[in-house]
Image (cartoon, rainbow, N blue to C red):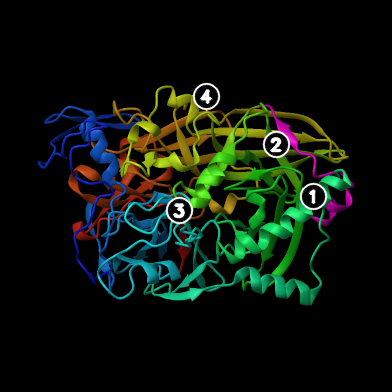
Amino acid sequence: MAVCTMATMHAAVHHHHHPLLNVPPPPRHRVRVVVRRTAGTTAAAVTSEPDTFSNAFWDYNLLFRSQRAETSDPVQLRVVEGAIPADFPAGTYYLAGPGMFSDDHGSIVHPLDGHGYLRSFRFHPDHGVHYSARYVETAAKSEEKGDGASWRFTHRGPFSVLQGGHRVGNVKVMKNVANTSVLWWGGRLLCLWEGGMPYELDPNTLETIGPFDLLGLADEAAAAQGRVAGRQRQRRPWLVEAGLDVATRLLRPILSGVFSMPPKRLLAHYKVDPKRNRLLMVACNAEDMLLPRANFTFYEFDAGFGLVQKREFVLPAHLMIHDWAFTDSHYVVLGNRIKLDIPGSALAMTGTYPMIGALQLDPSKETTPVYLLPRSTEAVASGRDWTVPVEAPAQMWSMHVGNAFEEDLGRGGLDIRLHMSACSYEWFHFHRMFGYSWKNKKLDPTFMNAAKGKELLPRLVQVAIELDKRGACRRCSVKRMSYQWNKPADFPAINPSYANKRSRFIYAGGASGSRKFLPYFPFDSVVKVDVSDGTSRRWSCEGRKFVGEPVFIPTGGGEDHGYVIIVEYAVSEDRCNLVVLDARKIGKKSALVAKLQVPKHLTFPMGFHGFWADE
């Protein structure tokens, strides 16, 4: 994209000595890198500067600096290494993420509250790769920037506290920044956020069209077509149910009228069922965050956003979910147990504490509840009490799901497998994620790289559940996905045509552990795990560089016939690169087949989740 504005890009922290961390100003000279290559990996050694905490601190914070530049026209990217393969398909890689973290009045927000900044990489066999980037013009963005060049944050967001804006009594919590994920479906390009309506954008110019009321359209269609399955509720004492009903009626007008929370919040993670060519989405009720009752509404859409199925479930638990899974017969919810934090709630209501501080993790049980909710008519008719979860024998905070599938065991039994990432309750912390500290205006990399973090941070696991013909659980196990890869990893991805069926290969972002002060996060590697035998291979960045979420681009043929694309953040060079890896060669020197350089003035902060759309 050509540049609309070339304003200075601001770091997410102030560039001055911080007494709490004793961090000197960032180094101003370029680092010389000597690269050592070994089979299966790429390692790098910094020779002109030691691997100091100062370098680690600034490398980390540069990943989350604000970017004020957008593009008016696509910018052709220069290939700086290798070449785009001849069999690389035509299409567009869209990448969602935050772009603005610091305003011009002293406020710095949590990365999860940063304004949505959508990037696109359009591949064309005859014309190379063109890059575009624009902010999603949400209502919050229009209010906090408007038509001028200055930014003033007025919304708190769920994870932040405003330092330079209106703090006490600020009820602007639901700041829909459309920054979490992106989806191309039914001729629409949508940016999603964990708690509000998707925003629709033009797929070519990235101009914002406006909010897309997907839930409203789905509910109208369900009512007209009579496709709403009866709500499946838990069996609890009537007095408890009556109390929760009263609490719900009291909370809803407060949440919607005072805090502008929609009655239902659409989760940012969606699923695509390639067997049926359906889009699957799920919504939760606003009051679920505060009450020990979880409402899940699952929607299935055809290729034109026509509603195919809607099912509603009510579970007797206080849960939070970020990602989920599906099989032919089930929607699979891995419950992260939470509870209300009364002191945190009181502080959060005043605006002097992050709103998410009203909640805390509930590690009271050493297991993880896995809810197998009926998707198919056969599962509905089975008669099993689906409100009772399968208790996986490990306490895990579920992060992201790469794949799930089920296979017939004969005589009516089912074998269900989940390939996912999960972390420890001991490490996960709502408003300190990414090292955010609203009191000190800094991102502290030590939180994400704490001692013993390798055992606590996200890791790749496989959950196996065996059901008998009545739906009762015979056995459930949790194990590492790879016996070779025991380091932190997240963002598991697969060949999308293998979703909802047995897949052999998982690709994920991982940490090589080569940085002394950043051993676990940010990730610097792409890990390829062979689930069939537990082996793993990796490709790693060279020098002071990091990577985001891998996305698999299939080319036909076998499961790993295709390419993995990732964005490489070369913080020491103040650049971003788009890297193309041959999926079959990960672990070899020849894995990297192309690297394309984003112009320096358009270098962007770390993205979250992406989507590949074929032409």
Q: Where does the magenta region start and end? A: 375-393
Camera-near label (3 vs 2) is 2
Spatial separation of the CA atoms under disc 4 and disc 3: 27 Å
State which quadrant residue 34 falls in. top left
Q: Which mark is residue 410?
A: none
Q: Which mark is residue 243?
A: 1
Residue 402: give x, y in percent of width and height: 56, 44
Q: Is residue 14 magenta?
A: no
Question: Where is mark 3, residue-wise?
Answer: 609
Question: Where is mark 2, residue-wise?
Answer: 369
Question: Where is mark 4, residue-wise?
Answer: 483
Label 2 sits on a secondary structure element that is strand
Residue 613: give x, y in percent of width and height: 47, 64
Disc 1, disc 2: CB below 8 Å?
no
Tell me the kind of residue under disc 1. Gly
Spatial separation of the CA atoms under disc 2 and disc 4: 25 Å
Disc 2, disc 4: CB below 8 Å?
no
Camera-near label (2 vs 4) is 2
Badge 1 or badge 2: first in the primary sequence: 1
Badge 4 or badge 1: first in the primary sequence: 1
Label 1 sits on a secondary structure element that is helix
In this picture, residue 86 sits left or right of residue 245: left
**Neighbour class for label 2 at 10 Å: few (<14), some, many (≥20)?**
many
